[in-house]
Amino acid sequence: MDSGSGVIISPDGLVLTASTLLSRDSATIKIQLSDGQTYSADVVATDSATESALLHVRLQAGSIIPFLTLANSSLMKVGSPVMTAGNPLDSISADHQVAFSVGSITAISDVRSGDVCSRYFGSALETDAAINAGSEGGALLNETGHMIGMTCLCVDRTRMRGCAVPSNRIKAAYEKYLTDQNYSTDAAVCHCSTPTAATTRNVSVVSYSMPSGTTSIQAGTRLQIVTQSASASPCVCNCIASATCRCDGCVVQIDARLNESDEGAKVLNSLGEQVGSVTKMDLMRHLGAQNAGVSFFTPLEKLPGTSETDAPLIDLIAKCSRAFVFIGNGSGVMISEDGMVLTNFHVAGSKSTWTVRLGGETQTRLCDMIEKDEQRDLCLLKIRDISHAPFIALGNSSTLKAGEQVLALGDPFSLGHKNGDPAASIGIISALHRNQGRYTDAVQTDCAINPGNSGGPLINMAGELVGLNGQIISRYGKNNTGIAFSIPVNQIKAALPVITRATELRKAVAQATAGSTATR
């Protein structure tokens, strides 16, 4: 059996997985749970129409095992928030963690796979949540944590988005076995200890240049990309706006994965008002970065206002963008008011002095190397002649949880390097304590991270730095596929003790100054 995913769907050990993972003569296989326990499982049945297989775990008599409930997939709508759970790249065998990614149902239609790894044909739930090799056989969950589809390697040929086989089709295929097991699909509680608060997939406005006198789209504005289809229901991507102006024409950059089929799509705000559309020229702006989470649309000349519900995210992105640092072909983040900058060694480790620019500024500044660690891929630099600078405070990465929402800032493909603002993307913590290349104990996220994002900050919703973005796993060249890795901030603090010393020194000086002032 190949490395992939599976989902326990009954308390007595029925497991749903992808039949593409089984060899033709498979009768008994080994499975591993996320807690590290391994079991033998018998192949009960397979169904070629759904590319699925039903296994039964050999449990001791009377044993009950955690399971997910199969829900009614017909209740899902285009735009419904969802979450994928799986084992991309056999990550469970390394650290016993399930990987999560959030998104939405982008389309519900009949598809024929455009991927050689799958021959699936039929009804599918399309999603922009991350699905990669090893995720086949995993779960597509609704916002209450119930399973509404089995993820597969079927990829729609037109839109090139991931797919899941609807749970109702699977229940019909295995009705006999589910009935024999006295299995109820109406249970109200999900017995799997996974995150259940799914959020919408974040499509983030990165930059735009608007005619004078118009109302601009602010970073943090929630958007929907609605693509009409003559043969199927509309395809909808839920999204948010995430950055400020860049004077490279009247376009808006977003972290959606748009394709040729999205030409003519309407872009709506959270009030349902149209704010733009996707033109043929917009689709040609991909810059070779298809499926990387870097796309564009053209805004209307006269734009409606912004919903008050978007204000917290708008404020957070605006505040954090001021502490962003453009450096070389990558990114950095200011972590102190006197100009201390963190970035990756592979971004800035080759020189002792750099010319950098802060987010929201047009002038450049000189920056000197203070400390570097090639093994941990870290650099600490100091901007010259700066004080009272905007910065992002260091948080505590040990408190992060899978499913927690995070913000990534960066400069993908150097699109904002000359005079723009950083690109922002919202995602979740997919998993923790990952070992990837030279990164140990890394944070995995499904934020759109691409070349140019290296060294940029990963930020929690309190506006604190919790990681430094540095690596991705790609299926198409160097483009993001929803699997990115960040160095946790606690590891950074331990690796670069000068940060702690500088922080303690500043506190001591501040306390001494306050004490001296009080005695006068």
Image (cartoon, grey):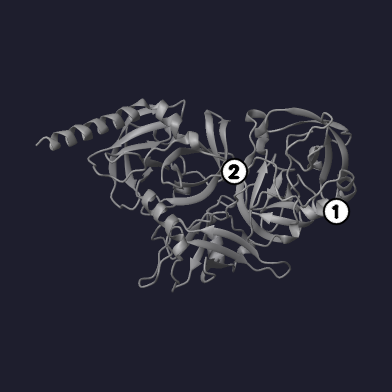
Return the x and y of residue 232 as percentages of the image width and height. Answer: 72, 66
> Under tag 2, what secondary structure?
loop
Q: Looking at the picture, which amino acid does disc 1 mark?
A: Ala
Rendered position, 296 above or below 8: below
The mark nearer the N terminus, 2 or 1, is 1
Task: Tell me the quadrant of the picture where the C terminus can be found.
Answer: top left
Residue drawn at 66 percent across, 62 percent down: 78
Is 295 displayed left or right of 55 in the figure? Answer: left
To which residue does mark 2 refer? 477
Q: Is residue 28 visible?
A: yes
Is 177 displayed left or right of 403 in the figure? Answer: right
Return the x and y of residue 516 as percentages of the image width and height. Answer: 14, 34
Which quarter of the figure has residue 109? bottom right
Q: Nearer the viewer, residue 273 or 339?
A: 273
Callout 2 crowding tier (Cα within 10 Å): few <14, some 14–19, many ≥20: few
The numbered dot on residue 172 is: 1
Rendered position, 145 above or below 346: below
Please say if the residues under marks 2 and 1 sit with CB atoms less than 8 Å apart.
no
Task: Tell me the quadrant of the picture where the N terminus can be found.
Answer: top right
Q: Looking at the picture, which amino acid does disc 2 mark?
A: Gly
